[in-house]
Image: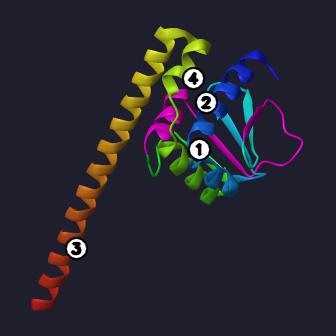
Amino acid sequence: MSVLLGGVEAPLNQMLALDPATPDHLQKFQQKIVELRMTGTAQSFFILFTEDKIFIQTASLRTKDVFIAASPAVFLALALSPLERHPNLIIEGDLLLARDLQAWMSTAKIDWARLLQPIIGTTGTGFVLQQAETAHKTFTRMKQRFQENLTDYVQLFLLATSSRRLS
């Protein structure tokens, strides 16, 4: 394992060990393999879930259960708060696993700033966290606009169909 991956894996597992809900969540993902790829790079990371830990590897001997690709900011936005979908996110494979994993990560007690700071420094961590917050806000606004537009379209459709019935 590279120093970079070890620098993420060990503190991540330490933080997860502090959360009493972790074993219940990890049970659901046990023996699953998730491939994560940062968009713009050819490097993938494979996360293997066991009953009490997460292992991060650069290669996997087994077939992945789900593939997820996004920018670092979108990954972090997904990990910080529950989002249903993001326009710059690619998911292939077990969509339910991806959804359940994202829902759990958004509620897990992980100090992302503490986890990222030794790897990318204070400035880099601040930048990535800011980008994640921006990605989350942008997606939330897009989702709200879509819901508002959908409501308007449904009302117009109902008005148009009821007008035809009256004539």
- Residue name at image x 37 percent, y 41 percent: 139
- The earlier-in-sequence mark between 4 and 3 is 4
4 vs 1, front mark = 4
Q: Is residue 69 left or right of residue 160?
A: right
Instruction: Give how far apart the Cα atoms at labels 1 and 2 are.
Output: 9 Å
User: Is residue 30 left or right of 136 when viewed as pictured?
Assistant: right
Q: Nearer the viewer, mark 2 or mark 3?
A: 2
Q: Position of residue 96 (x, y in %)?
A: 60, 60
Question: For numbered disc 2, what is the local secondary structure?
Answer: loop
Quadrant where the C terminus is found in the figure: bottom left
Mark nearer the viewer, 1 or 3: 1
Q: Which residue is mark 1?
A: 90
Q: Are marks 4 and 1 in contact (CB under 8 Å)?
A: no
Badge 1: few (under 14), some or many (20 or more) residues near its Cα, within 10 Å? some
Q: Nearer the viewer, residue 99 or 122?
A: 122
Q: Report how far apart the C-alphas of labels 2 and 3 lie in the structure.
A: 40 Å
Q: Nearer the viewer, residue 54 or 57?
A: 54
- The vertical placement of 95 against 135, above or below, is below
Residue at the spot 20% in from the left edge and 81% down from the top edge: 161
> Mark 1 to mark 3: distance in Å?
33 Å
Task: Work out which quarter of the rendered image holds the N terminus and state it.
Answer: top right
In reply to whether residue 69 is colored magenta, the answer given is: yes
State yes or no: discs 1 and 2 in contact (Cβ < 8 Å): yes
If you read the primary sequence from the N terminus, does the residue marked by circle 2 or circle 3 appear first? 2
Q: Nearer the viewer, residue 85 or 146?
A: 85
| Label 4: how many Cα within 10 Å (few below 14, some 14–19, many 20+) | some
Tell me which numbered mark, 1 or 2, is placed earlier along the sequence: 2
Q: Amino acid at mark 3?
A: Phe
- Residue that badge 2 annotates: 39
**Contact (Cβ within 8 Å) of mark 4 with mark 3:** no
Type of amino acid under label 2? Thr
Real-space Cα separation, disc 2 to disc 4, in angstroms: 21 Å
